[in-house]
C-alpha cells in the first residue's frame, strides 16, 4: 500500500494559509485594501520599464491638458502637466520612488530597532540603559526638523531620504520590541529553554522573536503609511526627491502653483497618497487581529458563521 502522506502538504500549514485567506476574504475592506496595494506594487515594479519614456516625453502643445480629454490619447485621461507630460504615466512611474523610499526606510528602521530592542529587553540592565538612552536622544529631536537638517547637509537623494526617515523611526520599533521582550522572557517556555541550557541568542531567535514578530509587522504596516506621508511632506517642501526622479509628493509640490487653473496637477498625486495610506491603515487593522492568537478567533468565528 502506497503511503500518500509524503505527497501531500502538511495539513496544519495548508489549513493555516487557507484560514488566513478566508478571513481576508470575509473582511471586504481588508480584501479590497490588499488588492489596491497589490496593484500599486505592480505599478511600482513594472511602470518605469513600460511607461518611463512616455512619462518623461514633453509636448508643450499639451501643457496643462484637462483630464478626461482622450483627443491626445489614452495616456492623457488624467490630463497633462505643465510640460505636456501625461499625468497617468507619471503617476505610475512615480509609484516606484515613493514605494522604494517608504519600504527602504521601514525595513531599515525595523531591522535596527528590533535588533536593539531584543538586546535591550533580554540582556542585562546596563546594556538596556545604554540602548534606551540612545533612543531618547533620537526622540528628543523633532523628526521633521531632523530630516530637514540632514537632507540640507547631505543633499536630497533617495538613499539619503531612506536613511534620515529610518533614523527617525528606529525608536518606535526599539521601544515596542523591548516592552514585548520584557514580558515574553518571563514566560514558562523561555524559562524552560534556559534550564535546558539553550544559549541566549538561540532563545531570542527561536522563542522570543516569533512571539514579537506579529506586533512588529502590524506597526511596520502602519509606519509605512506614516513614512510615505513624511516623504511627501519633505518633497512638498522642496528638500525631498529632486527631478528627474519623481514621487507623488514632488508632483503635488510641482502642481501647487497651478491650483487655480490646473487643479488636477496636484489632485491626482494627492489622491494616490490618500488611497495608499487608507489601504495600509485598513489592512493593518485586519493584520493586528489576524496575527494575534488571542484575538483572531473573532475573524475565524465570522468566517465560520458566514459559511
Image (cartoon, helix red, strand yellow):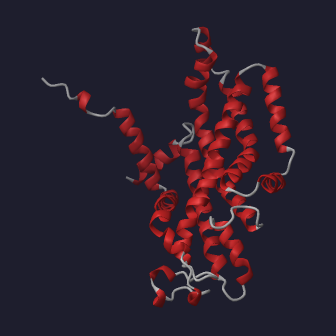
Q: Quadrant of residue 173?
A: top right
20 or 275, nearer to the observer: 275
| 85 over 119 or under it: above or below | below
Counting labels gives 0
Question: What percent of the width, then of the height, locates residue 142?
Answer: 84, 51
Q: Nearer the viewer, residue 288 or 267?
A: 267
User: Which residue is rendered at x = 66% and y = 58% of the image?
Assistant: 228
Q: Is residue 115 above or below residue 173?
A: above
User: Looking at the image, is 62 positioned above or below residue 127?
Assistant: below
- Left or right of residue 269: residue 116: right
What's the residue at 53%, 73% (across, down)?
Answer: 55
Residue 133 location (% of width, % of height): 84, 33
Q: Does the image show residue 65? A: no
For the point 80% across and 37% down, the residue is 135
Query: Left or right: where does residue 155 sit relative to residue 275?
Result: right
Q: Quadrant of residue 155?
A: bottom right
In the shown orientation, is residue 144 left or right of residue 207?
right
Q: Residue at x 55, y 73 (%)?
A: 56
Residue 48 higher or lower than 288, as above or below? below
Can residue 19 be seen here?
yes
**In the image, residue 258 lies at what x, y percent?**
71, 83
Quarter holding the N terminus is: top left
Amino acid at each position: 500500500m502506497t503511503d500518500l502522506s509524503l505527497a501531500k502538504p502538511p495539513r496544519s500549514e495548508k489549513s493555516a494559509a487557507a484560514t488566513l485567506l478566508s478571513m481576508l476574504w470575509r473582511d471586504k475592506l481588508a480584501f479590497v485594501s490588499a488588492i489596491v496595494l497589490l496593484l500599486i506594487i505592480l505599478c511600482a515594479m513594472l511602470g518605469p520599464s513600460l511607461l518611463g519614456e512616455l512619462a518623461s516625453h514633453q509636448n508643450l502643445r499639451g501643457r496643462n491638458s484637462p483630464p478626461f480629454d482622450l483627443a491626445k490619447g489614452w495616456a492623457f485621461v488624467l490630463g497633462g502637466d505643465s510640460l505636456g507630460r501625461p499625468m497617468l504615466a507619471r503617476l505610475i512611474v512615480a509609484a516606484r520612488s515613493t514605494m522604494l523610499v517608504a519600504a527602504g526606510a521601514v525595513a531599515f528602521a525595523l531591522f535596527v530597532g528590533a535588533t536593539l530592542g531584543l538586546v535591550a529587553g533580554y540582556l542585562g540592565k546596563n546594556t538596556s540603559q545604554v540602548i534606551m538612552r540612545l533612543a531618547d536622544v533620537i526622540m528628543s529631536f523633532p523628526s521633521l526638523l531632523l530630516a530637514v537638517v540632514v537632507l540640507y547637509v547631505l543633499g536630497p537623494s533617495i538613499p539619503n531620504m531612506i536613511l534620515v526617515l529610518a533614523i527617525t523611526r528606529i525608536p518606535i520599533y526599539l521601544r515596542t520590541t523591548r516592552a514585548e521582550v520584557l514580558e515574553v522572557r518571563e514566560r514558562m517556555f523561555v524559562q524552560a529553554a534556559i534550564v535546558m541550557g539553550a544559549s541566549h541568542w538561540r532563545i531570542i531567535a527561536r522563542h522570543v522573536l516569533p512571539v514579537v514578530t506579529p506586533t512588529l509587522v502590524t506597526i511596520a504596516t502602519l509606519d509605512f503609511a506614516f513614512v510615505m506621508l513624511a516623504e511627501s511632506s519633505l518633497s512638498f517642501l522642496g528638500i525631498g526627491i529632486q527631478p528627474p526622479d519623481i514621487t507623488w509628493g514632488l508632483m503635488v509640490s510641482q502642481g501647487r502653483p497651478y491650483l487655480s487653473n490646473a487643479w488636477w496637477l496636484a489632485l491626482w498625486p494627492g489622491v494616490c497618497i490618500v488611497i495608499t495610506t487608507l489601504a495600509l491603515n485598513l489592512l493593518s487593522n485586519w493584520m493586528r487581529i489576524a496575527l494575534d492568537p488571542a484575538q483572531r478567533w473573532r475573524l475565524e468565528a465570522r468566517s465560520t458563521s458566514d459559511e
